[in-house]
Amino acid sequence: MNKNRLSSFIDIRNAFFSEVAIGILANTILLLFHAHNFLLEHRPKSTDLTMGHLALIHIVMLLTVAFMATDTFGSQKTWDDIQCKLVVHLYSSMRGLSICATCLLSVLRAITLSPRNSRLAKFKPHSSHHNLYCTLFLWVFNMFISGYFLVSTVATPSVTSAHLLRVTESCSLCPVIHFLRYVHFVLRTFQDVCLLGLMALSSGYMVTLLYRHKRQTQHLQSTKLSPKAPPEERATQTILLLMSFFVVMYFLDITVSWFSRKLWDIDSVHMCVQMLVGNGYASISPLVLISAEKQIIKVLKYIW
């Protein structure tokens, strides 16, 4: 590794671990806040469980990828087959659950915002129960889909092979029978397309409701009223910003992963870049959500 490449490697490594540290801290704050609201508040919000769940998923995801990064950046200890299979399976499951929880948050926000005479209004009283059942189903489903990596992940042999795709220094993906690859691809693609479609529909619905509300209240905008948006509107705008950021990072991650597969035998620098991009949403999304929570900001200001 030449001097310029070594410098780039160190810069990317430092940026990656900074991203992970910020993400874990922000997600921990978000998890504690919504866990407190859900367990101790008399009337918790319908989104408290989902936001806490999303934060928990991202904490596990970032801890797992940090563990993988220690191997990518040249750990002295090599992993065996079982360690590789479990770590890659857990990371894949958390990535799948991240998009599921994000979609669920968008749908719940749309249900909460819907007017009383709409068809979505009938789901409001039961949203917490449906949310819990849906969360359990999503965990089982994503663990099942990611079971593919329990078969395809192996410890990287000492002899270089052109048929292996490196995940970390110790772990690689080996070719498996066509049927398993096909089933995994179909299930994962079906899940992602459905969830992205639901996000688009719920986000479009929320934008429409906000536009109608703005038009109906335009005649009330005067100097006597506060120009600030009401809390419900600010919360909805935050969710819409989160959805937009997720979509951008999702397709950016797909692009980087596609180039990585084209290169096939990628080095440590390319793996660092891929991990940096792939975990950007998990690290930045809690900051977006925290910015909309005045109670958290007040506590952080008091501590500071």
Image (cartoon, grey):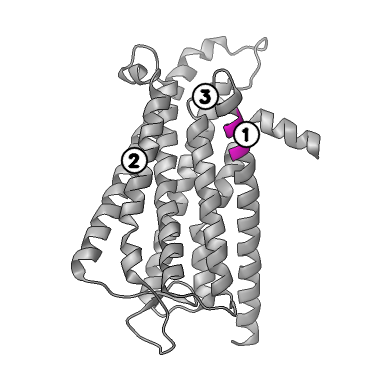
Q: Residue shown at 27%/59% (left/top)?
A: 184
State yes or no: residue 10 in magenta.
Answer: no
Nearest the viewer among 8 and 124 is: 124
Q: Is residue 177 left or right of residue 217?
A: left
Q: Nearer the viewer, residue 243 or 224?
A: 243
Q: Which one is earlier in the sequence, the residue at label 3 or at label 2?
A: 3
Mark 2, Cα crowd under 10 Å, few <14 / some 14-19 / many 20+, is few
Q: Secondary structure at mark 1?
A: helix
Q: Residue at x 48, y 77 (%)?
A: 170
Q: Left or right of 300: which side holds 38?
A: left
Placement of the C terminus among the 4 image quadrants: top right
Which quadrant of the rendered structure holds the N terminus?
Answer: bottom right
Disc 3 and disc 2 in contact, CB within 8 angstroms? no
From the top left corner, tell me how far across and down residue 24 is, in percent.
61, 51
Q: Secondary structure at mark 3?
A: loop
The answer, for residue 241, to whether it is visible in the render is: no
Residue 128 rendering spot, x and y as whole percentages: 43, 26
As measured in the structure, the alpha-carbon distance from the residue carrying label 1 to the one carrying label 3 is 12 Å
Residues drawn in magenta: 31-36
- Residue 198, numbered circle: none
Q: Amino acid at mark 1?
A: Phe
Seen in the picture, residue 260 relative to 54 is either above or below; the reply is: below
Left or right placement of residue 133 versus residue 246 in this view: left
Residue sitting at x 49%, y 75%: 79
Tell me the chief SS of the magenta region: helix
Q: Splitting the image into 4 quarters, where does residue 150 fall?
A: bottom left
Left or right for 215, reference 198: right
- The disc at residue 33 is 1
Which mark is on residue 45?
Answer: 3
Q: Earlier in the sequence, mark 1 or mark 3?
A: 1
Name the residue tied to disc 2. Answer: 137
Q: Secondary structure at mark 2?
A: helix
